[in-house]
Amino acid sequence: MSKFVYAFGVGKADGDGSMKELLGGKGANLAEMTSIGLPVPPGFTLTTEVCTAYYDNKHAYPDSLAAEVDQALKVLEQRMDKTFGGSENPLLVSVRSGARASMPGMMDTVLNLGLNDQTVQGVIKQSNDPRFAYDSYRRFIQMYANVVKGMNGEVFAKILVQKKEEKGVELDTELEADDLQQLVKEFKASYKEHLDEDFPEDPMQQLWEAIGAVFGSWMTPRAVTYRKLHGIPSDWGTAVNVQGMVFGNMGDDCATGVAFTRDPATGENYFYGEYLVNAQGEDVVAGIRTPQPINLAKHKEGDLPSMEEVIPEGYAQLVKIREILEKHYKDMQDIEFTVEKGKLYMLQTRTGKRTAQAAIRVAVDMVAEGLITEREAVLRVEPEQLDQLLHPSLDPNAEKNVIARGLPASPGAASGQVVFTADEAEEQNRLKKKVILVRIETSPEDIHGMNAAQGILTARGGMTSHAAVVARGMGKCCVSGCGEIKIDYEKQQIKTKSGEIVKRGDYITLDGSAGEVMLGVVPKVEPEVSGNFATFMGWADKFRRLKVRTNADTPHDSKIARDFGAEGIGLCRTEHMFFEGDRIQAVREMILAENVEGRKLALDKILPMQKGDFIGLFREMKGLPVTIRLLDPPLHEFLPQNDDDISELANVVGIRFSEVKEHVANLHEFNPMLGHRGCRLGITYPEVYDMQVRAIMEAACELVKNEGFKIIPEIMIPLISHVNELKILRANAVRVAEEVCADYGIKIDYLIGTMIELPRAALTADAIATEAEFFSFGTNDLTQTTYGLSRDDAGHFLPEYIERGVLNKDPFIALDQRGVGELVKIGFERGRSTRPGLKVGICGEHGGEPSSVIFCHKLGLDYVSCSPYRVPIARLAAAHAALTDE
């Protein structure tokens, strides 16, 4: 029979930290902390298997669960020396979720469970503090009604505000015992009014309903959204932790707080956190009160007193525990604690969520401190995290109109139009508009809007508030606790302390590193790769086997990619060069020419331009391989489509409007993606490919002859479906290449290969490899042709496919390994069977997506190629692939 309940307390635990799959992250770490002697309030954990059974059996629990919970409660009563439901010395408990992967703020919690009209009197007797007892009771009613019964928490918040106004006070802590006792009555009356039932007095009923609510919260929309964003499987389920309450709201020698063993925004090695005197844990993370720093490490004039000053004994205990936890877990920890009457208790530890900047600094520092190895450091940082580092920050020389300052909750810079709701943020994002989500404070229900926004601004909440923690996990810029602004949802506006009004739709810029809010759009600068980042990436490069190239069409993009560690160009799309400046006119002349001679005259104008482009690329790559794809798109893409533009072209070229119009009509294709493009153009108009090959080879010859470069150009012929296409075009390319070498009087090695982007090419790769010296899988088009989907049009319905579970991931974002990946495997194996030394890579955007990179490593490809800003992501993913493959 399965064991469904695991107890912990007084130095003993049924489980340990290795059991996260069964006990969830929180339960496993509570057990682990108990075992290593830390002060953890006793409790017990209902396993994730209960959650799975709960959903598999229509919300019914396993038969043996009730008896196991009863037994665990008895053990808990003994360890706490209190009685659950007792009127003299009552045991109160917290009921919290604990998934195996951290989901901050997404799941539900109930505190002070076990209170009723009888047990509250017992709490008064034991504590000799009626104010504390009724404060805990009113909190419990409010939380229970919201979490368990789904009541809107604003109902109770309004009653609380009215009570404070009536008493002429600002803070909850200024209310007296009689005020709180009256609030309990008013809360209960409101509970009955809204739910048409009395507040439950039976503690066992409270407990089972709270357990059900926590399991139920696993499938709330916010939790489902969070799991999708972070790739957490829905069948993992959550555990439930029932733990004896310790109280941070018993007076001024009590407190509660959240801390990180290092700064989660920068990675700096100092103890970082916030606390509140006379409060409970939800007060800190919910942003209801402005928290205070735990220490003087970053003290600024005007800061509220720190825990180090106010509760020095508790702080000293916390510092010791920080050291124990980092040495034990060998990673930065996110901890929750409570101080009750000067005694410190640990409520949670987990691996701390951190920005990419912090992740790299912590990894590098911990190697220097001897805590972890370089190998462990590389595996510690997820490749996707690097995306946060590879985007612009504010230009330090730009003019800034700073209208407000808050807390630097999540670094980076973002500009966008102000919106006040998560739904609008999501809607504007669908319309390709950049927005800043502005909220008084965020809640888990805002998760979809936070994901859609460029950045988040909140008026309330500290550095460990919901907005701050979630934004850091997402890599979003965030300024929290901006008390200098007043947000008016009704008027849809922000008013600053200086009287400035910012309305919905106005542009603002956030600097999440400085905590500044600026009016308008502030210019940004490119990131620099140096310091800890360079050290860390150097370690990654030591472990990886897979090469990483870039997709780049200009020297500027090539330089960015080189700076990010690209080892060559895997795809240069020559058609992008055709659209620049006056060369588009020559391209159009070529298309409209009546005969080969006319086309060649136009191509003679384009040749020096293309050669100049290639010289720039070869110079920037400094001898690294450069793969240049010959013209791919259909010719109609280069011609104007409306009458005004057609008329202008006719005047420039010197032919009648009707003739140009007829050319445009003749070139129209119903499905151009499958039409007259790629190698089909090269066969129909061989002079186009001849010009491009000549430009490539002349550029290479000039640099080799005049500047001493070592260059091996890789000429790639696109859209091959039959070996005979490649045979014809290869012969043409060789002829031109040899003519150029003879003209320059030098010998240059060059490779001629093809893109494998059609299923037939993959299936007949053994034949195609007789003519190709390299393959580059064009996985964008291979996905389109395998699925029969147009990438440009599928966006209308693919999101629904993902939402409804038809597909797990968008196949244009992550390589479909079972379908498209199988064609890549077939093409790779059949190509190598003919030509064992065949160089093989991929050059679709999948080349920068970590799971796709890992697939390419396992398959044995030589390289992946991706956009410049994704090069470091691919490098780290390749290192992870090599390290986990050992």
Image (cartoon, rainbow, N blue to C red):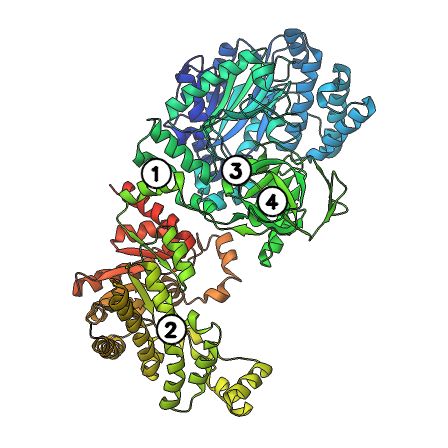
Q: Are marks 2 and 1 in contact (CB under 8 Å)?
A: no
Name the foreground residue: 116 vs 684. 684
Residue type at mark 1 is Leu
Residue drawn at x 49%, y 33% is 264
Callout 4: 10 Å neighbours few (<14), some, many (20+)?
Answer: many
Disc 1: CA contacts within 10 A as few (<14), some (14-19) or many (>=20): some
Q: CA distance from mark 4 to mark 2?
A: 41 Å
Q: Residues within 10 Å of mark 3 (few under 14, many from 20)?
A: many
Tell me: 665 left or right of 427. left
Q: Which residue is mark 3?
A: 218
> Which is more toward the observer, 759 or 137?
759
For label 4, the SS is: strand
What secondary structure is marked by label 2? helix
- The residue to which callout 1 is attached is 379
Provide the secondary structure element on which disc 3 rests.
loop
Position of residue 180 relative to residue 426, above or below, is above
Q: Earlier in the sequence, mark 1 or mark 4?
A: 1
Q: Say which residue label 2 marks.
A: 610
Cα separation, mark 4 vs mark 3, equals 33 Å
**From where the camera sits, is residue 685 visible?**
yes
Q: Which residue is mark 4?
A: 510
Callout 1–callout 3 Cβ contact below 8 Å: no
Spatial separation of the CA atoms under disc 2 and disc 1: 43 Å
- The amino acid at mark 3 is Trp
Q: Position of residue 609 (x, y in %)?
A: 40, 74
Name the one closer to the observer, 655 or 818: 655
Task: Pick whichever of labels 4 and 2 is earlier in the sequence.
Answer: 4
